[in-house]
Image (spheres, rainbow, N blue to C red):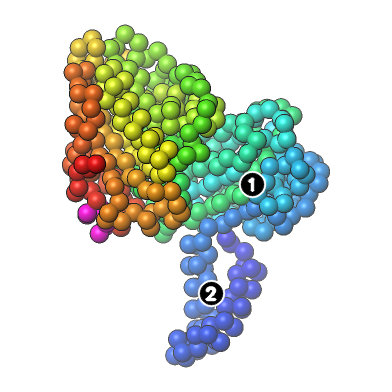
Amino acid sequence: MRNNKRLLSMAFLAIIFFSACKKESLTDFSAAEKTAKTVTELTALARTAAITENFESGTKTAYAIANVTLSSGSWSLDDALIGNSTSDRKTGTQSARIRNTGILNMNFDVDGASTVTINHAVYGTDGSSTWQLWVSTNAGSSYAQVGSTVTTSSTTLQSASFTINNAANLRLSIRKVSGGTNRINIDDIVINPASGGGGGTVPGDDDNMLMGNPSNATVDIVNTGNYLMDKTYYKMSYHRDRGTPNWTSWHIKSTDLGSTARQDDFRADATLPSGWYQVGSTSYSGSGFDRGHQCPSADRTASVAANSSTFLMTNMIPQAPNNNQQTWANLETYERSLVTAGNEVYIICGSYGIGGTGSSGSANTINSGHVTVPSNVWKVIVVLSNGNNDLSRVTTSTRVIAVNTPNINTINSDWKTYRVSVNSIEAATGYDILSNVPTAVQNVIEAVVDNQ
Protein backbone atom coordinates (compact mmCIF):
# COMPACT_ATOMS: atom_id res chain seq x y z
CA MET A 1 0.00 0.00 0.00
CA ARG A 2 1.42 3.39 -0.88
CA ASN A 3 1.40 5.37 2.37
CA ASN A 4 4.58 7.33 3.00
CA LYS A 5 3.88 8.16 6.62
CA ARG A 6 3.08 4.56 7.43
CA LEU A 7 6.14 3.33 5.55
CA LEU A 8 8.46 5.79 7.34
CA SER A 9 7.04 4.77 10.70
CA MET A 10 7.51 1.13 9.85
CA ALA A 11 11.03 1.88 8.63
CA PHE A 12 11.91 3.60 11.92
CA LEU A 13 10.62 0.69 13.97
CA ALA A 14 12.37 -1.76 11.73
CA ILE A 15 15.70 0.08 12.13
CA ILE A 16 15.40 -0.32 15.87
CA PHE A 17 14.56 -4.00 15.48
CA PHE A 18 17.40 -4.66 13.08
CA SER A 19 19.86 -2.80 15.29
CA ALA A 20 18.90 -4.82 18.35
CA CYS A 21 18.38 -8.25 16.81
CA LYS A 22 20.42 -8.37 13.61
CA LYS A 23 23.24 -5.99 14.23
CA GLU A 24 25.83 -8.31 12.75
CA SER A 25 24.10 -8.30 9.37
CA LEU A 26 24.21 -4.48 9.10
CA THR A 27 27.69 -3.68 10.42
CA ASP A 28 29.14 -3.42 6.94
CA PHE A 29 26.70 -0.66 5.92
CA SER A 30 26.70 3.08 6.60
CA ALA A 31 23.77 4.62 8.49
CA ALA A 32 22.22 5.85 5.26
CA GLU A 33 22.69 2.47 3.64
CA LYS A 34 21.10 0.77 6.63
CA THR A 35 18.02 2.98 6.37
CA ALA A 36 17.75 2.44 2.61
CA LYS A 37 18.20 -1.30 3.08
CA THR A 38 15.45 -1.41 5.71
CA VAL A 39 13.00 0.61 3.60
CA THR A 40 13.70 -1.64 0.61
CA GLU A 41 13.05 -4.75 2.70
CA LEU A 42 9.84 -3.28 4.11
CA THR A 43 8.62 -2.32 0.65
CA ALA A 44 9.26 -5.83 -0.62
CA LEU A 45 7.49 -7.25 2.43
CA ALA A 46 4.48 -4.98 1.90
CA ARG A 47 4.15 -6.18 -1.67
CA THR A 48 4.07 -9.83 -0.64
CA ALA A 49 1.61 -9.47 2.25
CA ALA A 50 -2.15 -9.67 1.86
CA ILE A 51 -4.15 -6.55 2.76
CA THR A 52 -7.16 -7.25 4.94
CA GLU A 53 -10.07 -5.03 5.90
CA ASN A 54 -12.36 -6.36 8.65
CA PHE A 55 -14.18 -3.09 9.55
CA GLU A 56 -13.30 -3.49 13.23
CA SER A 57 -11.51 -0.16 13.68
CA GLY A 58 -13.84 2.40 12.09
CA THR A 59 -17.02 4.18 13.18
CA LYS A 60 -19.81 5.37 10.87
CA THR A 61 -23.40 5.22 12.11
CA ALA A 62 -25.27 7.00 9.28
CA TYR A 63 -25.94 6.01 5.67
CA ALA A 64 -25.06 9.45 4.25
CA ILE A 65 -21.90 9.46 2.14
CA ALA A 66 -18.75 10.09 4.15
CA ASN A 67 -15.16 8.97 4.44
CA VAL A 68 -14.10 6.71 7.29
CA THR A 69 -10.60 5.70 8.33
CA LEU A 70 -10.24 1.94 8.63
CA SER A 71 -7.24 -0.25 9.38
CA SER A 72 -6.34 -0.54 5.67
CA GLY A 73 -6.81 3.15 4.88
CA SER A 74 -9.53 5.68 4.04
CA TRP A 75 -12.78 4.42 2.50
CA SER A 76 -15.79 6.30 1.16
CA LEU A 77 -19.11 4.75 2.28
CA ASP A 78 -22.12 5.91 0.26
CA ASP A 79 -25.55 4.70 1.46
CA ALA A 80 -23.55 2.47 3.76
CA LEU A 81 -22.39 2.40 7.36
CA ILE A 82 -20.40 0.32 9.86
CA GLY A 83 -22.88 -2.00 11.58
CA ASN A 84 -22.53 -3.64 14.97
CA SER A 85 -26.08 -4.70 15.78
CA THR A 86 -27.20 -8.26 16.46
CA SER A 87 -28.73 -8.30 12.97
CA ASP A 88 -25.44 -7.46 11.25
CA ARG A 89 -23.67 -10.56 9.91
CA LYS A 90 -20.04 -10.25 10.88
CA THR A 91 -16.82 -11.86 12.00
CA GLY A 92 -15.93 -10.04 15.19
CA THR A 93 -17.97 -7.06 16.31
CA GLN A 94 -18.50 -5.01 13.12
CA SER A 95 -19.06 -5.22 9.38
CA ALA A 96 -20.07 -2.85 6.60
CA ARG A 97 -23.80 -2.58 5.85
CA ILE A 98 -25.05 -1.39 2.43
CA ARG A 99 -28.58 -0.57 1.25
CA ASN A 100 -30.24 0.58 -2.01
CA THR A 101 -27.40 1.06 -4.54
CA GLY A 102 -24.77 1.85 -1.95
CA ILE A 103 -21.02 1.77 -2.59
CA LEU A 104 -17.87 1.02 -0.61
CA ASN A 105 -14.96 2.81 -2.30
CA MET A 106 -11.27 2.69 -1.42
CA ASN A 107 -9.69 6.18 -1.36
CA PHE A 108 -6.19 4.73 -1.76
CA ASP A 109 -4.27 2.48 -4.12
CA VAL A 110 -2.65 -0.90 -3.47
CA ASP A 111 0.33 -2.27 -5.38
CA GLY A 112 -1.61 -4.66 -7.57
CA ALA A 113 -3.57 -7.77 -6.69
CA SER A 114 -3.83 -11.39 -7.73
CA THR A 115 -7.17 -12.22 -6.11
CA VAL A 116 -9.71 -10.56 -3.85
CA THR A 117 -12.04 -12.41 -1.49
CA ILE A 118 -15.04 -10.77 0.18
CA ASN A 119 -17.43 -12.21 2.76
CA HIS A 120 -21.10 -11.28 2.38
CA ALA A 121 -24.53 -12.06 3.84
CA VAL A 122 -28.01 -10.55 4.09
CA TYR A 123 -28.70 -8.22 7.00
CA GLY A 124 -31.21 -9.59 9.49
CA THR A 125 -34.22 -11.08 7.71
CA ASP A 126 -33.86 -8.96 4.54
CA GLY A 127 -34.33 -10.50 1.12
CA SER A 128 -31.62 -11.16 -1.45
CA SER A 129 -29.61 -8.53 -3.31
CA THR A 130 -26.83 -8.49 -5.87
CA TRP A 131 -23.54 -6.65 -5.90
CA GLN A 132 -20.41 -6.27 -8.01
CA LEU A 133 -16.70 -5.65 -7.60
CA TRP A 134 -15.24 -2.85 -9.72
CA VAL A 135 -11.56 -1.95 -10.04
CA SER A 136 -9.79 1.29 -10.99
CA THR A 137 -6.19 1.45 -12.21
CA ASN A 138 -6.13 5.26 -12.58
CA ALA A 139 -6.66 6.45 -8.99
CA GLY A 140 -10.44 6.31 -9.22
CA SER A 141 -10.95 8.25 -12.46
CA SER A 142 -12.71 5.27 -14.05
CA TYR A 143 -13.67 1.74 -13.04
CA ALA A 144 -14.34 -1.61 -14.73
CA GLN A 145 -16.27 -4.57 -13.32
CA VAL A 146 -14.22 -7.63 -12.39
CA GLY A 147 -15.76 -11.11 -12.27
CA SER A 148 -19.47 -11.79 -12.23
CA THR A 149 -22.33 -10.23 -10.30
CA VAL A 150 -22.74 -11.87 -6.89
CA THR A 151 -26.11 -12.74 -5.36
CA THR A 152 -26.34 -12.42 -1.58
CA SER A 153 -29.13 -14.57 -0.17
CA SER A 154 -27.61 -16.34 2.85
CA THR A 155 -27.98 -15.26 6.48
CA THR A 156 -24.48 -16.59 7.18
CA LEU A 157 -21.34 -15.10 5.69
CA GLN A 158 -20.34 -16.58 2.34
CA SER A 159 -17.05 -15.99 0.52
CA ALA A 160 -16.91 -14.52 -2.99
CA SER A 161 -13.59 -14.71 -4.82
CA PHE A 162 -12.44 -12.53 -7.73
CA THR A 163 -9.38 -13.00 -9.93
CA ILE A 164 -7.56 -9.73 -10.63
CA ASN A 165 -4.02 -10.69 -11.76
CA ASN A 166 -2.93 -7.08 -12.24
CA ALA A 167 0.38 -5.72 -10.94
CA ALA A 168 -0.62 -2.08 -11.53
CA ASN A 169 -1.72 0.26 -8.74
CA LEU A 170 -5.42 -0.24 -8.19
CA ARG A 171 -8.32 0.46 -5.87
CA LEU A 172 -11.59 -1.39 -5.27
CA SER A 173 -15.24 -0.39 -5.39
CA ILE A 174 -17.96 -2.70 -4.02
CA ARG A 175 -21.35 -1.75 -5.50
CA LYS A 176 -24.79 -3.00 -4.54
CA VAL A 177 -26.80 -3.12 -7.77
CA SER A 178 -30.20 -4.64 -6.90
CA GLY A 179 -32.46 -5.53 -4.01
CA GLY A 180 -33.75 -2.06 -3.23
CA THR A 181 -33.90 -1.37 0.49
CA ASN A 182 -32.73 -4.91 1.31
CA ARG A 183 -29.45 -4.58 3.15
CA ILE A 184 -26.31 -6.67 2.86
CA ASN A 185 -23.28 -7.00 5.09
CA ILE A 186 -19.73 -7.00 3.72
CA ASP A 187 -16.83 -8.22 5.87
CA ASP A 188 -13.28 -9.58 5.80
CA ILE A 189 -12.03 -8.20 2.48
CA VAL A 190 -8.68 -9.81 1.60
CA ILE A 191 -6.53 -8.42 -1.23
CA ASN A 192 -3.84 -10.91 -2.16
CA PRO A 193 -0.83 -9.21 -3.76
CA ALA A 194 0.29 -9.59 -7.34
CA SER A 195 3.66 -11.18 -7.96
CA GLY A 196 6.42 -9.29 -9.70
CA GLY A 197 5.55 -11.04 -12.95
CA GLY A 198 1.86 -10.18 -12.70
CA GLY A 199 0.83 -13.80 -12.38
CA GLY A 200 -0.44 -13.47 -8.83
CA THR A 201 0.35 -15.39 -5.69
CA VAL A 202 -0.80 -18.80 -4.56
CA PRO A 203 -4.36 -18.49 -3.20
CA GLY A 204 -5.46 -19.78 0.19
CA ASP A 205 -7.28 -22.86 1.42
CA ASP A 206 -10.52 -23.81 -0.33
CA ASP A 207 -9.84 -21.48 -3.26
CA ASN A 208 -11.33 -23.02 -6.38
CA MET A 209 -8.01 -22.68 -8.19
CA LEU A 210 -5.64 -23.58 -5.35
CA MET A 211 -3.93 -26.34 -7.35
CA GLY A 212 -2.95 -23.92 -10.11
CA ASN A 213 -3.84 -22.20 -13.37
CA PRO A 214 -3.25 -25.02 -15.89
CA SER A 215 -3.11 -22.85 -19.01
CA ASN A 216 -2.01 -19.52 -17.48
CA ALA A 217 -5.44 -18.08 -18.33
CA THR A 218 -5.80 -14.32 -17.91
CA VAL A 219 -8.62 -11.79 -17.58
CA ASP A 220 -7.36 -9.89 -20.63
CA ILE A 221 -10.20 -9.92 -23.18
CA VAL A 222 -7.72 -10.14 -26.07
CA ASN A 223 -6.93 -13.64 -24.77
CA THR A 224 -10.01 -15.02 -26.52
CA GLY A 225 -8.89 -18.64 -26.42
CA ASN A 226 -7.80 -18.68 -22.77
CA TYR A 227 -9.99 -16.17 -20.90
CA LEU A 228 -10.07 -16.51 -17.11
CA MET A 229 -13.54 -16.32 -15.54
CA ASP A 230 -14.37 -16.41 -11.84
CA LYS A 231 -17.95 -17.57 -11.29
CA THR A 232 -17.57 -17.45 -7.46
CA TYR A 233 -18.38 -21.15 -7.05
CA TYR A 234 -15.86 -22.28 -9.66
CA LYS A 235 -13.24 -20.80 -11.98
CA MET A 236 -12.52 -21.54 -15.60
CA SER A 237 -10.56 -20.84 -18.74
CA TYR A 238 -13.08 -20.04 -21.47
CA HIS A 239 -12.55 -20.33 -25.23
CA ARG A 240 -14.62 -17.78 -27.14
CA ASP A 241 -14.38 -19.52 -30.51
CA ARG A 242 -15.14 -23.02 -29.20
CA GLY A 243 -18.03 -21.72 -27.07
CA THR A 244 -16.94 -23.95 -24.18
CA PRO A 245 -14.52 -23.86 -21.25
CA ASN A 246 -11.04 -25.26 -21.80
CA TRP A 247 -11.06 -26.31 -18.15
CA THR A 248 -13.01 -25.65 -14.97
CA SER A 249 -11.60 -25.81 -11.45
CA TRP A 250 -13.40 -26.08 -8.09
CA HIS A 251 -13.17 -27.34 -4.52
CA ILE A 252 -15.68 -29.44 -2.59
CA LYS A 253 -15.97 -29.70 1.17
CA SER A 254 -18.85 -30.95 3.29
CA THR A 255 -20.46 -27.51 3.63
CA ASP A 256 -20.83 -27.31 -0.17
CA LEU A 257 -23.22 -30.26 -0.10
CA GLY A 258 -26.65 -29.25 1.18
CA SER A 259 -30.31 -29.74 0.38
CA THR A 260 -30.89 -27.10 -2.29
CA ALA A 261 -32.93 -28.42 -5.21
CA ARG A 262 -31.56 -28.55 -8.74
CA GLN A 263 -32.43 -25.18 -10.29
CA ASP A 264 -32.35 -26.21 -13.97
CA ASP A 265 -32.09 -22.54 -14.99
CA PHE A 266 -29.85 -23.03 -18.01
CA ARG A 267 -29.00 -19.60 -19.41
CA ALA A 268 -26.51 -17.56 -21.40
CA ASP A 269 -23.66 -15.96 -19.49
CA ALA A 270 -24.19 -12.20 -19.77
CA THR A 271 -20.81 -11.48 -18.14
CA LEU A 272 -18.88 -12.50 -21.25
CA PRO A 273 -17.00 -9.58 -22.84
CA SER A 274 -19.01 -7.32 -25.11
CA GLY A 275 -19.32 -8.68 -28.63
CA TRP A 276 -18.61 -12.31 -27.70
CA TYR A 277 -21.17 -14.88 -28.80
CA GLN A 278 -23.31 -16.07 -25.90
CA VAL A 279 -24.26 -19.74 -26.08
CA GLY A 280 -27.94 -19.95 -25.10
CA SER A 281 -30.07 -22.39 -23.15
CA THR A 282 -31.44 -23.94 -26.37
CA SER A 283 -28.19 -23.91 -28.35
CA TYR A 284 -27.74 -27.69 -27.91
CA SER A 285 -31.36 -28.56 -28.82
CA GLY A 286 -31.68 -31.34 -31.39
CA SER A 287 -27.91 -31.88 -31.53
CA GLY A 288 -27.86 -35.31 -29.88
CA PHE A 289 -25.53 -33.97 -27.18
CA ASP A 290 -26.29 -33.12 -23.55
CA ARG A 291 -25.53 -29.80 -21.93
CA GLY A 292 -22.74 -31.39 -19.93
CA HIS A 293 -21.90 -29.57 -16.72
CA GLN A 294 -18.22 -29.15 -15.96
CA CYS A 295 -18.80 -28.10 -12.34
CA PRO A 296 -21.81 -30.32 -11.52
CA SER A 297 -25.07 -29.07 -10.10
CA ALA A 298 -24.91 -31.64 -7.28
CA ASP A 299 -21.51 -30.32 -6.15
CA ARG A 300 -23.10 -26.96 -5.33
CA THR A 301 -26.23 -27.55 -3.23
CA ALA A 302 -25.48 -25.34 -0.22
CA SER A 303 -27.55 -22.44 -1.61
CA VAL A 304 -29.75 -21.45 -4.53
CA ALA A 305 -27.07 -19.04 -5.77
CA ALA A 306 -24.42 -21.75 -5.74
CA ASN A 307 -26.57 -24.26 -7.58
CA SER A 308 -27.86 -21.73 -10.08
CA SER A 309 -24.32 -20.69 -10.98
CA THR A 310 -23.63 -24.15 -12.43
CA PHE A 311 -26.35 -23.70 -15.07
CA LEU A 312 -24.55 -20.92 -16.91
CA MET A 313 -23.85 -22.10 -20.43
CA THR A 314 -20.19 -21.12 -20.04
CA ASN A 315 -20.04 -24.14 -17.68
CA MET A 316 -21.24 -26.57 -20.38
CA ILE A 317 -19.75 -28.73 -23.12
CA PRO A 318 -21.59 -30.85 -25.75
CA GLN A 319 -21.33 -34.25 -24.08
CA ALA A 320 -22.53 -37.61 -25.42
CA PRO A 321 -25.63 -38.52 -23.35
CA ASN A 322 -24.31 -41.86 -22.07
CA ASN A 323 -20.98 -40.26 -21.22
CA ASN A 324 -22.75 -37.53 -19.26
CA GLN A 325 -25.58 -39.47 -17.64
CA GLN A 326 -23.75 -42.70 -16.86
CA THR A 327 -19.94 -42.64 -16.86
CA TRP A 328 -19.51 -39.05 -15.74
CA ALA A 329 -22.46 -39.17 -13.33
CA ASN A 330 -20.99 -42.25 -11.64
CA LEU A 331 -17.64 -40.50 -11.26
CA GLU A 332 -19.29 -37.39 -9.81
CA THR A 333 -21.22 -39.49 -7.29
CA TYR A 334 -17.98 -41.13 -6.24
CA GLU A 335 -16.30 -37.73 -5.75
CA ARG A 336 -19.06 -36.62 -3.39
CA SER A 337 -18.84 -39.91 -1.48
CA LEU A 338 -15.21 -39.08 -0.78
CA VAL A 339 -16.31 -35.77 0.73
CA THR A 340 -19.02 -37.30 2.91
CA ALA A 341 -16.41 -39.82 4.10
CA GLY A 342 -14.32 -37.04 5.66
CA ASN A 343 -12.29 -35.65 2.78
CA GLU A 344 -12.14 -32.49 0.72
CA VAL A 345 -11.36 -32.62 -2.98
CA TYR A 346 -9.89 -30.25 -5.53
CA ILE A 347 -11.10 -30.91 -9.08
CA ILE A 348 -9.93 -29.72 -12.49
CA CYS A 349 -12.11 -30.84 -15.40
CA GLY A 350 -11.81 -30.12 -19.09
CA SER A 351 -12.10 -31.24 -22.69
CA TYR A 352 -10.03 -31.17 -25.83
CA GLY A 353 -10.01 -32.24 -29.48
CA ILE A 354 -12.70 -31.93 -32.11
CA GLY A 355 -15.50 -34.39 -32.90
CA GLY A 356 -17.68 -36.58 -30.73
CA THR A 357 -20.55 -39.02 -31.21
CA GLY A 358 -23.88 -38.31 -29.57
CA SER A 359 -27.30 -39.96 -29.80
CA SER A 360 -27.81 -38.57 -33.32
CA GLY A 361 -24.40 -39.48 -34.67
CA SER A 362 -21.04 -37.76 -34.99
CA ALA A 363 -20.46 -34.03 -35.18
CA ASN A 364 -17.57 -31.58 -34.99
CA THR A 365 -19.69 -28.54 -34.11
CA ILE A 366 -23.26 -27.66 -33.17
CA ASN A 367 -25.28 -24.44 -32.94
CA SER A 368 -24.36 -23.37 -36.50
CA GLY A 369 -20.67 -23.74 -35.73
CA HIS A 370 -20.69 -21.63 -32.59
CA VAL A 371 -19.98 -24.59 -30.29
CA THR A 372 -17.21 -27.13 -30.84
CA VAL A 373 -17.86 -30.75 -29.90
CA PRO A 374 -14.79 -32.13 -28.06
CA SER A 375 -13.32 -35.55 -28.73
CA ASN A 376 -12.32 -36.15 -25.10
CA VAL A 377 -13.48 -35.20 -21.61
CA TRP A 378 -11.00 -35.38 -18.72
CA LYS A 379 -10.86 -34.81 -14.98
CA VAL A 380 -8.20 -34.67 -12.24
CA ILE A 381 -9.20 -35.08 -8.58
CA VAL A 382 -6.87 -34.36 -5.65
CA VAL A 383 -8.09 -36.05 -2.46
CA LEU A 384 -7.14 -34.68 0.97
CA SER A 385 -8.43 -35.52 4.42
CA ASN A 386 -10.22 -32.56 6.00
CA GLY A 387 -7.74 -30.04 7.38
CA ASN A 388 -5.89 -26.77 6.86
CA ASN A 389 -2.90 -25.60 4.81
CA ASP A 390 -4.13 -27.74 1.95
CA LEU A 391 -1.42 -27.07 -0.61
CA SER A 392 1.34 -27.98 1.83
CA ARG A 393 -0.48 -31.26 2.57
CA VAL A 394 -0.18 -32.44 -1.04
CA THR A 395 2.66 -34.95 -0.86
CA THR A 396 4.04 -37.78 -2.96
CA SER A 397 1.55 -40.11 -1.24
CA THR A 398 -1.54 -37.96 -1.92
CA ARG A 399 -4.23 -39.75 -3.89
CA VAL A 400 -4.78 -38.20 -7.32
CA ILE A 401 -7.44 -39.63 -9.66
CA ALA A 402 -7.13 -38.80 -13.36
CA VAL A 403 -9.76 -39.88 -15.89
CA ASN A 404 -9.86 -39.35 -19.66
CA THR A 405 -12.94 -40.52 -21.57
CA PRO A 406 -13.79 -40.45 -25.28
CA ASN A 407 -16.83 -38.26 -25.95
CA ILE A 408 -18.92 -41.05 -27.46
CA ASN A 409 -22.27 -42.64 -26.71
CA THR A 410 -20.97 -46.23 -26.84
CA ILE A 411 -18.98 -45.76 -23.66
CA ASN A 412 -18.43 -48.04 -20.66
CA SER A 413 -20.44 -46.78 -17.68
CA ASP A 414 -17.58 -47.70 -15.32
CA TRP A 415 -15.37 -44.61 -15.08
CA LYS A 416 -12.52 -46.67 -13.63
CA THR A 417 -11.99 -48.12 -17.10
CA TYR A 418 -10.67 -44.74 -18.20
CA ARG A 419 -8.18 -43.97 -15.44
CA VAL A 420 -4.89 -42.53 -16.70
CA SER A 421 -1.98 -40.50 -15.35
CA VAL A 422 -2.06 -36.73 -15.05
CA ASN A 423 1.02 -36.70 -17.25
CA SER A 424 -0.93 -38.25 -20.13
CA ILE A 425 -3.63 -35.57 -19.91
CA GLU A 426 -0.98 -32.86 -19.82
CA ALA A 427 0.62 -34.38 -22.92
CA ALA A 428 -2.72 -34.27 -24.75
CA THR A 429 -3.64 -30.73 -23.69
CA GLY A 430 -0.33 -28.94 -23.19
CA TYR A 431 -1.45 -27.86 -19.70
CA ASP A 432 0.42 -27.86 -16.39
CA ILE A 433 -2.55 -29.07 -14.36
CA LEU A 434 -1.19 -29.03 -10.78
CA SER A 435 1.12 -26.08 -11.35
CA ASN A 436 1.01 -24.78 -7.75
CA VAL A 437 2.18 -28.11 -6.35
CA PRO A 438 5.98 -28.31 -5.82
CA THR A 439 7.68 -29.79 -8.87
CA ALA A 440 9.24 -32.66 -6.94
CA VAL A 441 5.78 -33.72 -5.72
CA GLN A 442 4.22 -33.24 -9.16
CA ASN A 443 6.81 -35.52 -10.72
CA VAL A 444 5.62 -38.37 -8.50
CA ILE A 445 1.85 -37.96 -8.25
CA GLU A 446 1.33 -37.02 -11.90
CA ALA A 447 2.99 -40.20 -13.12
CA VAL A 448 0.79 -42.56 -11.09
CA VAL A 449 -2.42 -44.18 -12.38
CA ASP A 450 -4.89 -44.51 -9.52
CA ASN A 451 -5.91 -48.10 -8.66
CA GLN A 452 -8.02 -47.71 -5.50
Picture coordinates of residue 146, whole percent (x, y): 51, 39
N-term mark: 1 or 2: 2
Picture coordinates of residue 218, whole percent (x, y): 39, 42
Q: Is residue 315 left or right of residue 409?
A: right
Look at mark 1 in the image and give the residue it sits on. Answer: 187
Q: Is residue 397 left or right of residue 300?
A: left
Is there CB contact under 8 Å for labels 1 and 2? no
Q: Is residue 107 visible?
A: no
3D distance between C-alphas at marks 1 and 2: 31 Å
Q: Is residue 415 left or right of residue 57?
A: left
Q: Is residue 174 left or right of residue 69?
A: left
Helix, strand or loop under label 1:
strand
Q: Residue at x 80, y 41 (%)?
A: 64
Helix, strand or loop under label 2:
helix
Q: Residue at x 55, y 86 (%)?
A: 19
Look at label 2 and name its amino acid. Answer: Val
Look at mark 2 in the image and give the residue it sits on. Answer: 39
From what the image shows, is residue 227 above or below residue 45?
A: above
Span of residues in magenta: 439-444
**Quadrant of the frame with the C terminus:** top left
Look at label 1 and name its amino acid. Answer: Asp
Picture coordinates of residue 57, whole percent (x, y): 72, 57
Which quadrant of the figure has residue 378? top left
From what the image shows, is residue 309 above or below residue 90?
A: above
Q: Is 38 covered by the magenta stretch?
A: no
Number of other residues with Cα within 10 Å of mark 2, as a class: few under 14, some 14 to 19, many 20 or more: some
Q: Residue at x 49, y 36 (%)?
A: 256
Which quadrant of the figure has residue 133? top right
